[in-house]
Image (cartoon, rainbow, N blue to C red):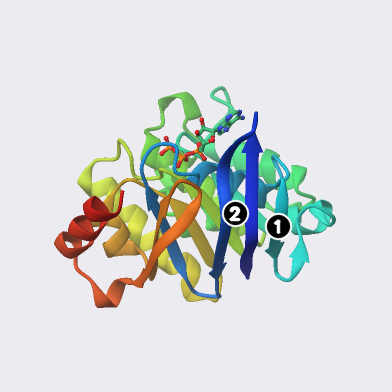
């Protein structure tokens, strides 16, 4: 579903990405690890079409993002570290707004179902967003992705600042999201959660992938060891 082919990105002559090759298939939760500045967010930004690669290709469902941005943007969603929503609107009003923006119009009942599937209890759906925790905002973010019928969610540091219960709930939601053949690409510093939620892990250093492994082959302490040896 996602492919990076020899991606490079230069900022002021400095390479943030240096020949990155990466692919993410259906049903995968791919976790990108790497030190600050390794190039994780730059990778996601190129797939989202926020910036162009200097050389190489980023493909979503076989379409190059750079030349087919309108098409590729329709099937993706993005959950940043803090999901930006309208604080004065309720969860359901935000979902209604953002799904309309993506060209979908749903009944109140349908909107409620997306929110429940995203893990937001009915009692919270009509509360103002300004009262929501980070975990609740992410649930609205997942509901928006579901309402857009997105195949792929990109996530940047989704579990930073979440308490263990919220992290566990989030992990379950991610697994449910991909169970129907969708995919997630997540940048994270959370080694424990990467092993827990991910199907594969890539460790980046200086803009390239230096290790790639299946989570079934490694536990958190082995991954931590490998990470510390790598960076
Ligand atoms: N818009 C930009 N202008 C200039 N340099 C940038 C820009 N975006 C990223 N960089 C540089 O590119 C490199 C990679 O940054 P990036 O944000 O992709 O790393 P990261 O792995 O996501 O780090 P972090 O874990 O801190 O989020 C860094 O050296 C960063 O300073």
**Residue 5, placed above or below residue 79:** below
Find residue 177 and report its horizontal and vertical position in percent. 48, 65
Q: Give the mark nearer the N terminus: 1 vs 2.
A: 1
94, 30: nearer the viewer: 30
Label 2: state its secondary structure.
helix
207, 117: nearer the viewer: 207
Image point (54%, 52%), residue name: 154
The quadrant in which residue 203 appears is bottom left
Find residue 18 and report its horizontal and vertical position in percent. 57, 50
131, 60: nearer the viewer: 60
The residues bearing labels 1 and 2 have C-alpha atoms spaced at a distance of 28 Å
Find residue 22 and report its horizontal and vertical position in percent. 55, 65
For label 1, the crowd category at 10 Å Cα-Cα, with few meaning under 14, some 14 to 19 and many 20 or more, is some
Give residue 145's mark.
2
For label 2, the crowd category at 10 Å Cα-Cα, with few meaning under 14, some 14 to 19 and many 20 or more, is many
Image point (75%, 58%), residue name: 72
Label 1: state its secondary structure.
strand
The quadrant in which residue 173 appears is bottom left
Image point (37%, 52%), residue name: 33
Total count of labels: 2
In screen coordinates, is 204 left or right of 218?
Answer: right
Can you see residue 11?
Answer: yes
Q: Which residue is mark 1?
A: 56
Q: Are marks 1 and 2 in contact (CB under 8 Å)?
A: no
In screen coordinates, is 14 left or right of 34?
Answer: right
In screen coordinates, is 1 left or right of 173?
Answer: right
For the residue with label 1, is its CB less than 8 Å from the closest atom of ligand 1?
no
Tag nearer the camera, 1 or 2: 1
52, 134: nearer the viewer: 52
């Amino acid at each position: 579903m996602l492919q990076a082919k020899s991606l490079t990105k230069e900022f002021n002559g400095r390479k943030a990405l240096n020949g990155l090759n990466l692919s993410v298939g259906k049903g995968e939760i791919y976790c990108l690890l790497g030190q600050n500045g390794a190039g994780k967010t730059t990778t996601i930004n190129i797939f989202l079409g926020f910036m162009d690669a200097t050389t190489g290709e980023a493909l979503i469902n076989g379409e190059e993002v750079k030349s087919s941005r309108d098409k590729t943007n329709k099937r993706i969603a993005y959950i940043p570290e803090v999901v930006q929503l309208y604080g004065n609107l309720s969860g359901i009003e935000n979902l209604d707004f953002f799904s309309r923006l993506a060209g979908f119009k749903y009944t109140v009942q349908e909107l409620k179902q997306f929110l429940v599937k995203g893990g937001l209890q009915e009692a919270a759906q009509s509360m103002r967003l300004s009262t929501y925790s980070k975990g609740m905002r992410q649930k609205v973010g997942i509901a928006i992705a579901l309402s857009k019928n997105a195949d792929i969610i990109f996530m940047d540091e989704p579990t930073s600042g979440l308490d263990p219960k919220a992290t566990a709930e989030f992990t379950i939601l991610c697994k449910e999201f991909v169970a129907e053949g969708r995919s997630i690409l997540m940048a994270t510093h959370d080694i424990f959660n990467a092993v827990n939620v991910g199907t594969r892990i890539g460790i980046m250093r200086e803009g390239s992938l230096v290790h790639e492994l299946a989570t079934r082959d490694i536990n958190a302490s082995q991954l931590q060891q490998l990470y510390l040896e790598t960076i």
